[in-house]
Amino acid sequence: MSRYEAAKRDGLARIGIYEEGETSVSLPATLDTDSLFPALRERSLSNVPLSAEEAFVRDYFSPGDGQPVAVHPLAAQTAESGDCTMVAGWHTALKNPRNYAAWLATLKESVPPDTAWYAPASALPSTACLLVYSGFDLFDYRAVDLASAQKTFCLPEGEFPASLMETGACGCKGCRDGDLRQHNRLALDRELALVRHFIEAGRLRELMESRCRADAAQVGILRFLDRNYALMERSLPVARAVPMRANTAESQNRAEVRRFADRVIERFVPTRTDVAVLLPCSARKPYSLSRSHRLFMNTVDRRAHELIVTSPLGLVPRELERIYPAGHYDVPVTGYWDHEECAFIADILARYFDAHPYRRVVAHLDGGALTVAQMAAEACGIDLEVTCHGHPTSPASLRALDDALAGERRMQTDTIRGTVSWQFATDINTKGLQIRGRSMQMAVLRGKQQLFSIDAGTGLFRPTFDGWDLIPEGYRVKIDAFVPQGDVLAPGVTDCDPRIREGDEVLVEGPLALATGRAMMGADEMLRSKRGVAVRVRKTKKLGE
């Protein structure tokens, strides 16, 4: 009897436990799979090439009996929840970025999410991060042992002649003893330990962007995976507890960046005004804590809707400046925006202005940010009023901004409406609602009635039962006829909103009870899994009480 359960996720990557009989293995890991799956060496017809034609796969491929269950992109899948899924020959995909991404998407969509993934003879120190990032959990030493037989010295940065071992490039026990095979095995174990740490920290993407730099094929794979937005986005949490470090060109293609921009364009309901002012970003987050933005806010004085132009997010309305990742990202500041970056951000601005027309758009920008705004204005046919004279915080620039907004009516920035619309895709009436409290204990109240608490780490709203009454539909999880005594497990979920992602606030609805809590899985995993916590319950209410 086999069993797999994920305990921590970071995109497709997981930390989990796989049990086979009386053996329990913490994943991701490398081990002697012959002892775990003794019958595998006798199995035939599971090693059909990934590139084989469909007719060949249909005639010859076999998933095998017992564990692991072999799968193929062109074969009907027989893996069930708790199985170990084996993709034979996956090392051949590592040199074909387009097929790698396509095959992975096909397999991930057809195999239950609560299965362990085994890539035999594929893991080297240089490929381990990519394999785990792609959702593989279990590896063997065959690839590094083969490299040792070929006198190849393996590091996370690549494969080198064995003579490099004598230069002090590594000081492991294998290198000290002159044992190449031991070094290569230890190098793979160390890399997986590091990968596991980055999963626990919620920063595997940053490690992946760093590791792929040594191999053009890995850069290509990362880019093709990013293009499959549906696959990557549904597995990503709505917020993280750590900053998003956008240090490479690939960072702007992260699914989290596109998701934030799409929600700003398609969901966000801006403060009611017909004048917008475009402002530059700041190193400090949220922006309003920076000196430059205090100057901007005092000058604007609520006479325009404040929109911050930034890379890689594109556009951050003032109402959303505390929401992840807007309040939690870091980028290298050089003052230079390349053509691809400008085109990417200009497209976001143009789409926003098409969705949210303004009578006036004031651009208090300079440098690359101004170029982006001008590109967007030309694309959607609006006139920009530029108010910068030198640096945006110079006295002359601030006077010009003040003069440009003279006579415009003042309005109160509606952070509640903006956040709720972005987070829950609904527009609510915020009359009589106020944000009260400070720092770590902020809440949305109507009089003395609390409707939402605010997560100080992510900026997201946590609805009370009264708060959910303002959200007429969506972000619901349906359960069977039971009263949750703790967290809601995946087997108890009968249906859920397909928009739910890990970290989303949800309302659990059942015939006997309601509950509020945070989703621990995305909707797809919640519906297709038979194990694991689906919702971390915060409060339960029996119906009829």
Image: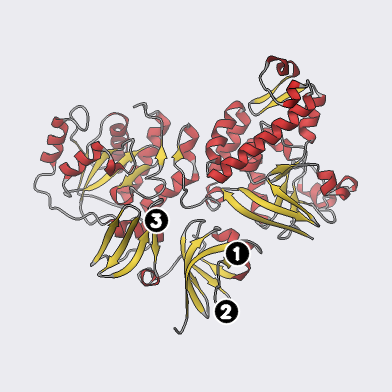
Which residue does the numbered mark 2 point to in the structure image?
A: 481
The one nearer the camera, 73 or 364, is: 364
* Disc 1 to disc 2, C-alpha distance: 17 Å
Question: Residue at horizontal 53%, vertical 45%?
Answer: 202
The outermost residue toward the left is: 407
Q: What's the residue at 18%, 35% (across, down)?
A: 387
Q: Nearer the viewer, mark 3 or mark 1?
A: 3
Q: Which residue bears the numbered disc 3?
A: 455
Q: Is residue 376 left or right of residue 528?
A: left
Residue for point 62% across, 42% down: 196
* Residue for badge 1: 527
Given residues 186 and 219, the one toward you in this image is: 186
For the residue labelled by badge 2, is the local secondary structure a helix, a strand or a loop?
A: loop
Q: Would residue 231 appear left or right of 538 to someone viewing this image?
A: right
Question: Depth-wise, is mark 2 or mark 3 nearer the camera?
Answer: 3
Classify residue 199 by image quadrant. Answer: top right
- The quarter of the rendered structure image containing the C terminus is bottom left
Look at the numbered disc 1 and give the secondary structure of its residue: helix
Residue 522 visible in the current orientation: yes
